[in-house]
Each structure stands twice: as C-alpha cells, then as structure tokens.
Amino acid sequence: MEPKKWVDLSLNSFADIENNLFEAEGYNNSFRFLKAQHKIDQIESQITLIEEDIASIRNALADLEKQESKNSGRVLHALDLFESLQKTVAEDSEKYGQALPEIEKQLENIQSEFSQFVTLNSSGDPVEAAGILDNAENHILALTHIVERIPSIVTKLTTELPDQLEDLEVGYRKLLDANYHFVETDIESRLQLLYEVLKNNQENIKKLELDNAEYENTQIQEEINALYNIFTREIASHKVVENLLATLPTYLDHLKDNNQVLVKDIERLSKTYLMSESDVNHVRRLQADLDSLEITSQRYDLRTRGIY
C-alpha cells in the first residue's frame, strides 16, 4: 500500500497544492485577500496530511527494511538446510529406490521457491517474500523427514522381504519333494500373492506414501511369518512321526511275538477245552492287522529312502 500512497502523493497531492498556490497568488494579486487566505488554509491542511502520509511511508519503509534484513538471515539458514538435504540425497541415491524421481522433483520445486523469494525480496516486496520463504522452509523440513524414513522402508521392501519369500518358496518345494503333505491347500496361491503385493507396494514408494508402504511391508511380513509357522509345524510333526516309525518295527516284533505265544496257547487249550469261536477269530484278526501294519511300515521306510 505504501508505494501506491507515495505515487498518489507524487502525482496528485503535490499537483493539487501547486494549483492551490497559483490560485492563492492570483487572489492575492487581485487584492482578494479573504479568498487568498482560504486557499492558504487549504494548502496548509493539505501539507499537514501529506506530512502524516510521508511519516507513515517512512515507517512502512523502515518495517520493510527490517523484514528484508530478517529475510536475509533466515534464507541463509534455509539454504544451509536445503544444501545439506541435496547432499544427503546425492551421496547414495540408490537407497531411495523408486522414490528418487519424486524426491528430485520436490527438490526442484524448493529450488524454484528460493528463486521466487530472491525476486520478491530484491524487488521491494519482502513481506510476500517472507511467505514464500515460510513455504520453502516447511517443504525442506517435510522432505528431510521423508528422506530419513525411506531407506529402511526400501531395504525392507526390495531386499529383506524378497529374500525371505525366496527362501520360503525354495523350502516349500523341498518339503513337497520330501513327500510332505499340508492340510492347507492355498499355499501356492499365497506365495504368488505375496510376490504381487511386493510389486504393488513399489507404487507407494514411488509416490512417497510412506505410511501405506510401511503398512504393506508389515502385512507382508506377517503373512511370511504365518507360512513359516506352517512349515515349521509340519517339519516338527514329521520328526515326531519319524521317531515313532523308527521304534515301530521293534514294537511290532514284540506284538507279533506275543501274538504267536497267544496263538500257541489257544491251540494248546483248544485240545482240552472248548474255545469260543469269537476269541479265535479275534486273535486271527489281530494277526492280520499286525501283518498289514508291518507292510505299511516297510513301505513308508522305502519311500523315505527314495526306493519306493
């Protein structure tokens, strides 16, 4: 407003005073002293107003000078922060993954804000320049926070999780080759879905949507852990079964021996006593069951050794 006020004074107020002076001089020369005095009073009133306006302009200029000086100090600090941020990104740009293009774009936007600031501050509009500098400082702080967060998220997404998933899939294939059987029938589709989610989460990194990226990383990790638990459970169960089967032949032999003794006792006693047919049949069925269990045990042993 103050530059406009000065223009108004220069173009209008001073011209009005000059015109009034000519009129007052004319009245005075024609001995019309009352009108001359009235013009002089009017001129004095205008001069008083102009003096007040000039004082206001001087105060405003002083304020602008202070603001410009304050801006100069602030911009040096902001530039230091900006240059430090640029250096951090440039030193190891690979760790920002697909976020790098957006980071570089935002750095360019901040650079543009500094150019706007310089133009406004040097052209006599330090107040608006201060607003531009506020925006630049806020953008620097926000981008610095983003740059600090990104590397760990990118490492998790591009290295840690893919490595775990690859190990998981390789382990699953080996377990299938070792004749493991899973109650869950959707393991294959769950593994493929994990690969898909990993790929899609790159888009969150690309857009700097870090909260979403971290959330998806957490969900992926939980699903990987769940699959690991399934495999661990099956491996533990497999070991229990193997231990049982390792002792089964000895146990079967013991049962068969006892059953043979029982058969001989029944044969001996049947010569003297009348034996129940159901008891005899029960012993025969037990013998058949033991024979069947022995065959099953032998087949399993052959399979585990890759022979059958």
Image (tube, rainbow, N blue to C red):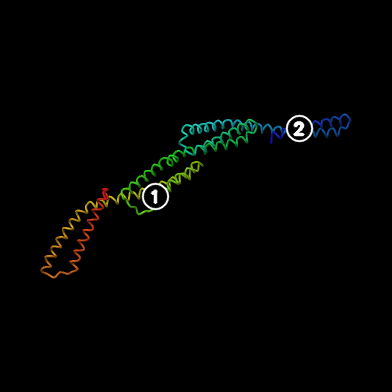
Say left or right for 174 vs 194: left
Q: Position of residue 74 (x, y in %)?
A: 56, 32
Q: How crowded is the residue under tag 1: few (<14 C-alpha within 10 Å), some, or many (20+)?
A: few
Q: Vertically, is 209 above or below 7?
A: below
Residue at horizontal 46 percent and vertical 35 percent from the top = 94
Outermost right residue: 30
From the image, tell me which residue sits under label 1.
Answer: 188
Callout 1 secondary element: helix
Whether residue 188 is visible, yes or no, is: yes
Whether residue 145 is visible, yes or no, is: no
Say left or right for 124 vs 160: right
Residue at horizontal 82 percent and vertical 33 percent from the top = 39
Q: Nearer the viewer, residue 207 or 26?
A: 207
Q: Nearer the viewer, mark 2 or mark 1?
A: 1
Q: Nearer the viewer, residue 295 or 240?
A: 295
Q: Vertically, is 169 above or below 289?
A: above
Outermost bottom residue: 274
Q: Position of residue 225 (x, y in %)?
A: 38, 47
Residue 11, labelled with which disc? 2
Mark 2 or 1 closer to N-term? Answer: 2
Q: Amino acid at mark 1?
A: Glu
Q: Position of residue 180 (x, y in %)?
A: 32, 50
Q: Amino acid at mark 2?
A: Leu
Q: Nearer the viewer, residue 104 or 74?
A: 104
Say left or right for 30 vs 102: right
Callout 2 secondary element: helix
Mark 2–mark 1 CB contact (< 8 Å): no
Say left or right for 143 vs 179: right
